[in-house]
């Protein structure tokens, strides 16, 4: 027997032994209406797929091994208003294409549509509808979860303090919360002690806060839409955040709250039609750039010593009060590139796009127009402009203000007008 023939037979034998040693492919189990999902979970081996056919399945499901639960034509798992509908106590569990309905309603026990327990890392919940659940998802002490493209509606007949949150994250790492639509809950997304996360493309409405978000670092919040809440985005006691290209409009209090926040970038956001566009409290060393603050009652409410922030190329348009600011000294915004102020009355003689006279928020003219709104009819008159110049020359007539030495003559956002009139709906 030649050496090559012997080598070939040895290679064939080793390949056969390797094939026998390799694990078999994951099995797929099919559950039909009237059958038990839990029984299929109990029979399945780690890594198996359980496909659930269209139908209504009453009861609760505990997933305690790595499995995929996949709905076929949107079956409904009904928790019968008690406990969690699905409880996850294993790593690498995927839940997709289901309707999850009727969890319990006890906030003491935090009943949820899907409760992901500590240690259940890399859980995936996607393309599910959550109907009449107290908490849509409760996610605690897990890493690398993906919550994607879910529709979550809470117990809308409960008073707001008695509802749970749509998505609750506590003590997590690297969560990805993407493309979810959450409404009629207490807070649409509640985040606490959760770091290195991405929140992208979510729609959050008809709740107390779009997000209630604190003690969390190095997170990205971008391309989300929050409307018809009490508050849009509430970011508190955080640092190293990127808050980018979000739209917060028609909220009854603030659009975006920045409270006790440091070293963060807030850029490209549209904040329109809120009681207060931004509420900034105890904020230091942040960058606010390219935001459009449009048609709010108060554009920015600045409080509690917030300073050392870089504020450049923002548009302040048609806010009844551009800045609400109380302090002992002026604060400079726009030192390098300036901001646009729709009530700026200065001029640009050299045509460089920057006003020749600095802008001052809350000067004597502003304070008079707050008290006497009909004065706005005369803002372009020589008399009012003269009054503004006189007030600048006599310090006793002016209060400390936000001062922009480079006011931009044109807005950065040419499509700003589409955001006017988007107010919180008031009952007649």
Image: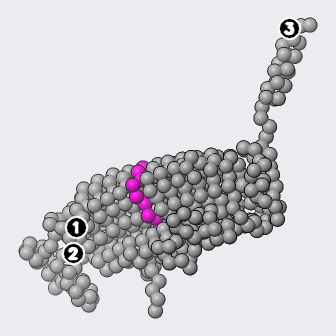
How far apart in space, not on screen, are marks 2 and 3 (Cα)?
94 Å
Residue 75 position, x and y percent, is: 75, 65
- Circles 2 and 1, Cβ within 8 Å, touching? The answer is yes
Are there few (<14), some (14-19), or many (20+) residues within 10 Å of tag 1? Answer: many
Q: Please state if 279 lies on the left or on the right of 50 as rendered.
A: left
As for residue 128 lying within the magenta part, the answer is no
The answer to whether residue 356 is seen in the rendering is: no
At a point 23% along the width and 70% down the height, the residue shown is 325
Residue 31: give its label: none
Mark 2, mark 3: which one is toward the viewer? 3
Are there few (<14), some (14-19), or many (20+) residues within 10 Å of tag 3? Answer: few
At a point 38% along the width and 72% down the height, the residue shown is 254
Look at the image and give the residue range highlighted in magenta.
210-219
Q: What element carries label 1?
A: strand
Residue 3: give its label: 3
At a point 48% along the width and 55% down the height, the residue shown is 170
Residue 98 position, x and y percent, is: 70, 62
Residue 145 position, x and y percent, is: 57, 51
The residue lying toward the viewer, choosing from 353 and 377, is: 377
> According to the image, label 1 marks what residue?
402
Q: Please state if 100 lies on the left or on the right of 137 as rendered.
A: right
Choose the circle earlier in sequence order: 3 or 1: 3
């Amino acid at each position: 027997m030649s050496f090559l023939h012997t080598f070939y037979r040895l290679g064939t034998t080793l390949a056969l032994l390797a094939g026998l040693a390799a694990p078999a492919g994951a099995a797929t189990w099919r559950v039909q209406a009237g059958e038990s999902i839990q029984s299929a979970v109990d029979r399945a081996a780690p890594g198996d797929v359980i496909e659930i056919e269209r139908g209504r399945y009453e009861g609760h499901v505990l997933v305690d091994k790595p499995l995929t639960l996949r709905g076929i034509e949107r079956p409904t798992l009904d928790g019968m208003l008690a406990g969690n509908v699905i409880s996850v106590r294993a790593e690498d569990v995927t839940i997709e294409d289901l309707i999850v309905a009727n969890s319990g309603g006890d906030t003491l026990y935090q009943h949820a549509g899907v409760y992901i327990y500590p240690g259940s890392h890399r859980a995936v919940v996607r393309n599910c509808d959550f109907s009449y659940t107290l908490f849509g998802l409760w996610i605690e002490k897990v890493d690398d979860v993906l919550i994607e493209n879910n529709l979550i509606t809470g117990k809308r007949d409960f008073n707001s303090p008695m509802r749970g949150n749509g998505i609750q994250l506590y003590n997590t790492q690297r969560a990805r919360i993407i493309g979810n639509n959450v409404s009629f809950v207490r807070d649409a997304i509640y985040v606490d002690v959760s770091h290195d996360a991405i929140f992208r493309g979510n729609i959050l409405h008809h709740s107390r806060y779009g997000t209630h978000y604190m003690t969390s670092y190095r997170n990205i919040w971008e391309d989300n839409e929050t409307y018809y809440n009490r508050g849009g985005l509430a970011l508190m006691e955080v640092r190293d955040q990127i808050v980018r290209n979000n739209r917060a409009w028609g909220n009854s209090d603030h659009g975006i709250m920045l409270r006790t926040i440091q070293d963060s970038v807030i850029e490209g956001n549209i904040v329109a039609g809120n009681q207060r566009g931004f509420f900034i409290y105890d904020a230091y060393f942040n960058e606010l750039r390219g935001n459009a603050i449009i048609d709010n009652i108060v554009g920015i409410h600045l409080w509690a010593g917030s300073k050392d922030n870089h504020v450049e190329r923002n548009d302040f348009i048609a806010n009844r009060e551009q800045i609400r600011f109380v302090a002992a000294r002026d604060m400079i915004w726009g030192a390098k590139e300036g901001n646009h102020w729709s009530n700026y009355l200065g001029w640009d003689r050299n045509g460089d796009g920057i006003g020749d006279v600095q802008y001052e928020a809350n000067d004597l003219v502003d304070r008079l127009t707050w008290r006497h709104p009909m004065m706005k009819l005369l803002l372009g008159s020589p008399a009012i402009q003269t009054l503004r110049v006189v007030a600048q020359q006599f310090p006793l007539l002016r209060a400390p203000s936000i001062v922009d030495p480079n006011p931009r003559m044109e807005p950065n956002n040419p499509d700003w007008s589409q955001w006017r009139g988007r107010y919180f709906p008031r009952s007649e």
